[in-house]
Each structure stands twice: as C-alpha cells, then as structure tokens.
Image (cartoon, coloured by chain):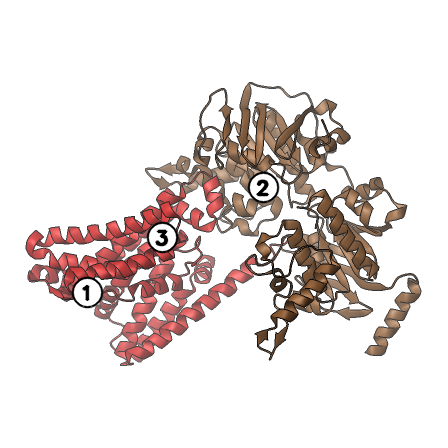
Amino acid sequence: MNRIVDLIKKQPIWIFVLVCIVFFSVSSPYFFDLNNFSNILVQASTIGLIALGMTFVMINGNIDLSVGATVALAASLAVGLQSELGIIGAVAVGLMSGIMIGALNGIIAWKTGVDAFIVTLGAMIGVRGLVFIYTDEQSFYAYDLAYSDFGASEIFSIPVLALIFILLTIVAHLILKYTIHGRNVFAVGGNRVAAKEAGIRVGPHMLINFILVGFLAALSGILLSTQMGASTPNLGRNYELWTITAVVLGGTRLTGGFGSIIGTLGGVLAIAILRNGMNLLQVPSFYVLIILGSILIIVLFIDKRFAEQQGQGVGA
Amino acid sequence: MTSQVETAANESVNLQPAQETLLKLQNVSKTFPGVKALDGVDLDVRAGEVHALLGENGAGKSTLMKILAGIYQPDGGEVILEGQRVQMTSPIEARDHGVLLIHQELSLVPDMTVAENVFLGNMPRFANMFVNNRHLNDRCGEILTRLNCKFEPTERLGNLSIANQQMVEIARALVFQPKVVVFDEPTASLTDYEKVVLFGVIRELRESGTGIVYISHRMDEIFELSDRISVLRDGTYQGTFETAQTNEDEVTQRMIGRDLDADIQHQPPELGPTALAVQGLAIEGLYSDISFDVRAGEVVGFYGLVGAGRTEVMETIFGLRKADAGSVQVQGEDLPISSPSDAIDQGLGLVPESRKEQGLVLGMSCKDNTTLANISKFTKYGWIDTAAERTIFEEYMEKLRIKCPGWEYETLNLSGGNQQKVVIGKWLSTSPKILILDEPTRGIDVGSKSEIHHLIRELAKTGLAVIVVSSEMPEVLTVSDRIVAMYDGRITQCFDRSEVTEDSLIRAITGQNT
C-alpha cells in the first residue's frame, strides 16, 4: 500500500491518467473498449518512441530539439528510396539518418561545449532544410502495399506499432534503471562535477543518448509513414515540443538528474488519452490544446510543491 | 503602540545607561529535521558596538544569522527590535526593519555597474518607470566616498577585486541606513591590507551608532575588533563576555567545551612503503615546486590559508588539472594521471572540498552515491546488481556509522556529517591505497567532526596513506603524523608532529619563515 502511495507521490501524472480513463469511460460509450485502447496506444507510439529517448537526454541534463525534423527526414528517405533500395534497404537508410543526426548533435555538443539546446536548435532548422531539398517539397507515396500493410498489421489482435512501443518502453526502462549507462546518466545530470570527479566520462554518455533519441525519432517517423503509406516534408512539425511536454509531464526535470521511463509513459498516455477522449466527445481539437497546456502547468506546479516540501530543512 | 515602544526603549535605556539595546533575541530556537540547530539562544546588540558571535562550524552561527536576516523563522523565542517584538518573515522585511546581512558569498551581478549593483532592486527612478542614472551614480558615489573606495560607480562590477566587491556589498547595505549590520565571516577571502580597510569601515559604522554583529571564528580579529563576544556551542548559548575583560583561553574553552579529540592516540605509526611521491609539481600562476611523499599508514596534513594552493595541488594529483611540470609517482610507478578515472585506477580517492557541489549527486540515494565511482564492480552481465550494491552500502553504513533511514534514502536530506561519511564511503568502496580529504569537516557539527577524525586515524592504521587538507589548526594537529605548511603556492616547511608548535605553524603559513 505504501508503495502505491509513494508511486502516486512520485508520479502525479498517473493519477491524471486514471482520472481521465474514468471520466471518459463514464462520458463516452465508445471509450472503454479494447479496440479503442489499441487505437490510443498506436496514436501514442509516435510521440512515445521519441519520448523514450528524450527521457535519457533530459535526465542527462540536455535537450534535443531536432527530433521533429529527424522524423521527416527518416520518413522521406524510407519512403522515397523504396523504388531503388527496396523496403528493407530504404528503412535501414532512414534509421541510419537518425543515428547520424544524433551522433552529430552529440559530438558537436561534447567537443565544442556549446549548449545542447543551441546545437539541436541549429540541427532542427538545418535538417528541415535538408528534407525540403531532398523531397523538393513533394510528398512521397509507398507504392509497395506491403509497407502500409505493416503499419496496419496486428499480432494476437494487438497492433504491431503498439507492440513495438510497449516492447521498447520496457527495454528503455530496464536500461535506464539497471545498467551502468542508465545510472551514470542520472549521475551526470544530477551533479556533473561530482560525476566527473568520480571518474565518470561525461561525453560518451551524452553521445550515446543523442544517438538513442535520433534512432528512436527516425523509427517513429518511419512507423508513422507506414500508417499513412506516405511521407510529407512537413511531417513531425512541433513533435519536439510534444515530446518534451510528455517527458516533463512524466516528472523528468528540465535541469536533469531526475526522471523515469514510467513517468514518461504516463505523460505520453495522458496526452494520447486526452486527445482520443475529447475526440470521442466531439470537442474541437483546439480546446484540447488549451486543456493540455493548462494540465502541463498544473502538473509541474504540483511537482514543484512536492519538491519544496522534500527539500525543506536542509539547513546549517 | 508608540507609547509601548517608548516605555520599552526607556526601560532598556535604564538598564544600559551607556548604550541603547537595538536588537534583542530571547530564547530563540530552531529545529531542522534531525538537528536542533539552535536551542534557547539569547543575544542583544547595542547601538554603536561590534558584537562578535563566536562558535565552531555547526555551532549555529549561520542559523542565528539567517533568523536575524529573516531567511529562517525561529520555532520558539522572540526577536525584539528597539523594544518592539517583530516578526521578520523575509529578507526584505528584515531590511525594512533596518537589519541587513553582508553575505559571506557575494550575491552581486558581475555584468552590471557598481552603482546598479548597489541599488539593485531599489533603483532611483523618475516618472516611476525609468532609471534615474545620474541620481544613481551620484548617490552611489557618496556612499563609496564614505567607504573610502577608490573605484567609480560606473565601473563594471566584474572588473573589481573580491575585496572591492565586498565593499560594494557593504555599500548596498548602507543604502538602507541600517540599524544593525551582520557581517558573516567577511575576511575569509581578504588580504591583510584589505582587512585593515574593512575594519576601518566597520569602526566607522560603529562610530555612527550602528549595531554590528560580527561572525567569525578567527580569534585574533575578534579580539582586535569587538566590544563584546557571545559564544555558541552546538546550538546553545554559552554566555556573553566583555572583550576587554576576557581572553582567548576563556572563550575557546566556552566554544569547544569538552575536548572531543582527547582520546586520539598518537602512537608512532607503523609505516609501510612510500605510497605517493610528488616531485617538483607546478602549475604556472597557481603553485610551484611542490615535492613531498606520503607513506602507507601515515596521515599527512596540508595546512595553509585559503588560496595557498593546497586544493589545486590535490586536484592535479587526482587528474582534474594538468601540471606544467613535475611528476607524480604512485607506489613507485611513474604513471601519468590525466583524468580522475586514471587516478581511481591507480588507487587514489579524493574527498573534495565541498561535498554538495563536488562530492555527492544529491538527488541520488545513499546506495547509488556509494557506488558512484566504481559502479562497474557491481554488475552481472552488464546489469547492475542492486543486491551487491545494498550489501556494500550497508557495510559502510555500519563501519562509518552513517545515520540514515535506509539505502534508498536521498543524500539531500542527510546532515552534513552523514553526507560526508557517504562521500568517504564512496571512496573506501573503491579500495584505495591513497585517500585525499580536502577540508573533511567543513560545516560539520562538533560530534561528527570528532568521529571523522577518529575515522581518519583508523584508516591510516589499516595501511592507507592519507592526506588531509585543512584550514583549521586543531584539526591538522589532531589527525596528522606530519604537517606540510603551504603559503602562496609554495611549501614553506614540513613538520614532524613531535616538533611542531602552533607558533611555528602560523609563521610558516603566513610566509614569515625564511
């Protein structure tokens, strides 16, 4: 019981998720339904996959603004190169592009010491330009139907995209919590100086995280394009903001050193459930934005109050 | 209300015909989780006196000062200002009451001008909107003249020396025409000449009728400057003395009370082979020609003033700084140390000067901090073995007597002494051959301090080579077998414990030895 109370204190976003589920179940007959839950998971997976990587980056004390542009680049490559390389080859190139952008972000931030915010802001603008050059401002369509079939496929009547998201969430949770890399990510974000003096090499951990988020952003973009059977150069606009919103809702601190994958999952689900439920209630989507914005501030306010309560009394 | 004030003021005038009592603390208490920081403390400050507040680190000086400045609220007792009971719930309120605090750490904006800093948050305006620059600089100039400062109000603050920045901090307090000014260890980073200037300013303030609370643990300054001395020990009030009618021995006795370190036995240590040999180490502008060695089983104390270069030498040995010249040998092998991880591989550990900024990841648990420096030892197939981590933490929790509710407890909420023990545990868990402790008991209460001293002796007995950097003479004398004195980036003298005297040590660290 204490564990549950503790969890709620540490993850206020899950209370919100539960409240949402109860509220929408009561107010819409279509909400509490296995098919709808599958839908929510598929919708959540796009932002969710990126958010997994972003959680690592943010706990480490950095941020990555280039993920939205990476989504577009990877999707365009994966769809656009299919005629030459086949589906597998094109997807591999798409994933590679994400890894490369992540590696570039990480290496520049590590070696030059320029703030990750600035480095990835530059990447966000530059990569988007690259997408427009490559696509010539055109949308691409996947002519091989196998590609879009994959996006709609199911295993044991669970959508494959949802399964991939769940699986990677579990893997990310285990890595963050039970590996040396995960532990050191917390240490570096929590106190960079102390981590350095304990012999932890700060740069490589940072680099790994940027590669991770780049890869996941690319994967997210490619999976999104399988849902649509197409890619557009404007794909993934504002995704960096939605991702950061989800991660922060999940209790990860912008200053680093604190956060969890479970929290991030809560943040991702909160956004997806709210959108889905409001949609079922036929609330215009602009209202959803107002509510999401308010929720973000309220949740962080609660979090801050808890932190203040805990931090009290560390006196002389 | 007014009449009440007058009556109270009259009463105090009757009691103290010579000087009026400005500020009075009665039976003030303050408790933090796990620590009673102040327990029934009294203090009265008269107009036109320098009232020194004396106590060891952790005696409650800072807490008392923060109560005066409205940063903390007392749990019990009263604050009486000019005969009237007041509640100061914020620094701004304290300021409006005329009580101002000169911080130990400067809280200024380097990129703004002197005048802008002096009037920060309190700019002279016109049309209620715009900054009145001329007025700003004129008024600042007047205050600077009063303080005998030689720099211009329009100077960028960051260009000033630390001492001059401190003057700006004082100028900032004077804007409010304070009744009581609290100085918190103001000389910590000043040269002798700057100190003289500062004392001149403090005396001038006293002449003008300001009540001054002067916090320090430097006995000589206190006797030079103060009219009365109040002593705190372990958060309790130990009495107030007229400076002219007391002496250093009496107040020291009050301040330290029992001699906690008395039972530390200094048997001639059983020395092993040389563990660390440093030859001609130098970094231009910081220190030069540093040579010494430490043998297994020995504690070597590094004594000197702040800024003598001791910390920088240790950081170089530990691979945090790059030396311009010289060599470091660990157990006879000349291996280059270019990063902390090299140093750790060589069997070195460094308990840094400030545990919160350098030693701990405060948001992480006790267990996680304990394994921070060698997490790879606690893994199975790449996964962290939490059970092994717990075992090692619990082992050190017992050995070092860390008072902590459990292994998952965040170090943020531990007391200073226990935090320091976690940092020490972190290094011991790497099984080091050489342990460097930089100011190991700074900001730690007297009891834990003594425990850490005992611990250092015990560690040496197990064959560890230990270096203790400290600015406190009693600490150096208590724990060391040998003492290396540093002054201005040089080693001035090495002492054997048996031959050292306080006088020769003082002379060695102030450069008076030839």
User: Chain A drawn in what color?
Assistant: red
Residue B353 image label: 2
Residue A233 image label: 1
Q: Name the residue under label 3.
A: A56
Mark 1–mark 3 Cα distance, whole angstroms, equals 27 Å
For label 2, the crowd category at 10 Å Cα-Cα, with few meaning under 14, some 14 to 19 and many 20 or more, is some
Residue B54 image label: none
Q: Nearer the viewer, residue B326 or B59?
A: B326
Mark 2–mark 1 Cα distance, whole angstroms, equals 53 Å
Q: Which of A207 and A216 is in front in this view?
A: A207
Mark 3–mark 2 Cα distance, whole angstroms, equals 30 Å
- Closer to the N terminus: mark 1 or mark 3? 3
| Residue B270 visible in the picture | yes
Asked which secondary structure carries label 2, the reply is: loop
| Rendered position, B252 above or below B67 | above
Q: What residue type is labelled 1?
A: Pro
Mark toward the viewer: 2 or 1: 1
Asked which secondary structure carries label 1, the reply is: loop
What chain is the brown one?
B
| Rendered position, B512 above or below B251 | above
Q: Quadrant of residue B137?
A: bottom right
Picture residue at 64% right of the left edge, 61% below the top = B153
Asked which secondary structure carries label 3, the reply is: helix
For label 3, the crowd category at 10 Å Cα-Cα, with few meaning under 14, some 14 to 19 and many 20 or more, is many
Mark toward the viewer: 3 or 2: 2
